[in-house]
Image (cartoon, rainbow, N blue to C red):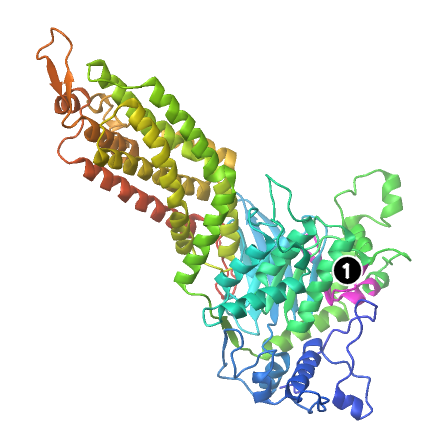
Amino acid sequence: MATSPLPRWAPTPSPSRPLWGPSSAAAASGSSSRLLSPFRAMLEALLRRRSAPTGEAPPPAPPAVDAEAAGAGVGGGIHAGFDGIITDRHPEDDGWREDIRRRDGGGVFITWEDVWVTAVDGRGRTAAILQGVSGSARPGEVLAIMGPSGCGKTTLLDTLAGRLHTNLRSKGDILINGRRQKLAFGTSAYVTQENVLMATLTVREAIYYSAQIQLPDTMPVAEKLARAGDTIQEMGLTGALDTRIGGREAKGISGGQRKRLSICLEILTRPRLLFLDEPTSGVDSAASYHVMSRIAGLAATEGMTIVAVVHQPCSEVFELFHGLCLLAAGQTIYFGPAANAAEFFTSNGYPCPPMRNPSDHFLRTINRDFELESEETRTVYKPSAADEAIETLVNAYKSSNTSENAKKEMHDINEMGGVMLRRNQATFLTKVLVLTRRSFVNMYRDVGYYWLRLGIYISISLCLGTIFYNFGYGYDSIRSRSSMLMFTGGLLTLMAIGGFPSFVEEMKIFRRERLNGHYGVSEFVISNWLSATPYLILIAVVPGAIAYYLSGLKRRVDHFMYFTLVLCSCTMLVEGLMMIVAAIVPDFLMGVITGAGIQGIMMLNCGFFQTPSKLPKIVWKYPMFYISFQKYALQGFYKNEFLGLVLENNPGVGDKTITGEQVLSKLFETEMGHSKWVDFAVLCGMIVAYRLLFVIIIKVVDKLKPMFKGETFRCQA
């Protein structure tokens, strides 16, 4: 077995990326030609600073890092768990592998070999997105994945992160620290291209809430807040702490600040492996440089392994990359040190012109989207057809020393073995409480969530109360009472879909945080339920009281309480229904239409527009009549109002009076075999059933669920 350390990529000297200096030991011996790896130099410097008494110069670096010292160092180690990290030894570790892990401070090496990804449409037709892509990424370095649009950059990133869509099939070997293992929470983090953030929160609140959710309960709250403060400073967000994020309703922080905030939320746990999808999109060149320079600084100081998809960086940003994976048409054009890419292109007949950004030259050479432009455009911008350039560069890379070096590095990394990394999390109760508080604040500040509905409900209740003012006890009051109750239970609950757009935005945040392992479906459902309950009670009690007492329904407190309980349960039930719709139809326009259609069908089968005995037996009576929540709400309203009521009958028709029981059994065909509380209990059961159905849909049907289970990828036929 080889005993030398793994080969290192040596970045080109530049003002923004200086060379790492030699170790103290090497300097003392007069040797200064050797370059240290960034994370080893960082670790040795931290260890010397930690061991030096206050006011004294740090002692010279030892020739090798001691095992116990490495465990006590900031960079982490094998013996001690830092910040909730728990490490398990591999039973076959030898001394060389042990030294590598001590030196790298528990970093994560990731390799991928011969990865193929194929898309499958509804007709079973397939199309290859990635074709035998291989590569590796190391701690302390930033690997950039570049290429023209549609070349498979994001697909490769999703494959490495274990987030492939279910209509994509993949095969190949993806190893973490030389082993097949699942990417656990805290070990890896993924920052999406879209900045999915809660618009109503300030930057400070967003980061503090996220810190309490992600960091373990063994860490004191003060330490969590300190970690959040350090992360804020690292990403340069101190000046925007008390500014709301903003969204569709109000202007908030800038695009660059949103991107940095998205990154900030994912690095609170100090993940060993960080995936970034287009971290420079939507920002200018200056902002993109500041974002990427801070990311590169995190890689060096924290020993992170960073894999980033970058579309077309400026020259200053390109200089920050250690490694470059250049793709075109799903194939590898180049993989190796970013500083050597220009030389590779030059040696194969595509030199980069002077004073031109290398990344612009690379993408212009292999971009075939515009190869059908005029001959003049082709002559100016492309020395040859893009397809010819891609074929030439792909073949040149396969036979180059760069490809052989990359394969050797992957082999060395896979031979070193590695530790299984996992990280403690906050408890279930902590997550539920923090999520409930955050969701409650969001609902309070978002006018469209509940406050607009409350205003509309009050207006409609005033209309109902004045139109049906003081029913009286004549025969005509029967129809007025039933119409008023049906309108209240039907239309007021139907308008609960008004908050669907706000809920869709919250669902986007839930999907992002769930995929990153912050919390699960159960915590989200329970916290959303708890935070929404006070608002649902408010929009049921206030408008309900207005309509109830103006119209002249039974003036007893217990009857009014039942009325509001049923109304509140209906609004909760519709909220659960819209959660299911949002899980299946995430587009809010289609979701509103779908939710309104479902509720309209339930209203038609509740027994008001057509008596139950006249409903067609197939479909409409069985099962629609019995699964319609409007049926149980309406029957509960009827029993609450008509039982014990004595009304005047039409003159000349039987008795002078008619009882409420007769109205229910003969006119409305209400099921009298159970009390109104049974109808209310059925509604409560439906509330729970809808929430459970939402959980099942998210876990089973959701196409965005993580797919990487730590096993070798195999093509699914």
Relative placement, left or right, of 649 versus 627 is: left
- Residue at numbered disc 1: 317
Residue at 23% over, 14% down: 476
Occupied quadrant, residue 648: top left
Query: Vertically, is 528 above or below 501?
Result: below
Occupied quadrant, residue 139: bottom right
Q: Nearer the viewer, residue 689 or 88?
A: 689
Residue at 54% over, 56% down: 163
Q: Where is residue 502 in the image (x, y as percent from the top left)?
A: 50, 41
| Res. 491 visible in picture | yes
Q: Which residue lies furthest to the right in this view?
A: 354
Q: Residue furthest top?
A: 652
Relative placement, left or right, of 619 versus 127 is: left
Occupied quadrant, residue 535: top left
Quick check: is 463 in the magenta stretch? no
Instruction: Assign a secondary structure to mark 1.
Output: helix
Label 1 packing within 10 angstroms: few (<14), some (14-19), many (20+) = many
Q: Which residue lies furthest to the bottom in this view?
A: 29
Kindly identify the amino acid type of the residue bearing the numbered disc 1.
Val
Q: Position of residue 594 (x, y in %)?
A: 44, 33
Q: Position of residue 677 (x, y in %)?
A: 20, 39
Q: Which of 352 and 436 is in front in this view?
A: 436
Quarter of the image for the N terminus: give it.
Answer: bottom right
Query: Vertically, is 524 above or below 673?
Result: below
Q: Position of residue 37 (x, y in %)?
A: 71, 78
Relative placement, left or right, of 362 versus 605 is: right
Query: Vertically, is 380 above or below 646?
Result: below
Residue at 68% over, 80% down: 40
* Residue range corresponding to the magenta coloring: 316-343
Q: How many labels does the image show?
A: 1
Quick check: is 319 in the magenta stretch? yes
| Res. 609 visible in picture | no
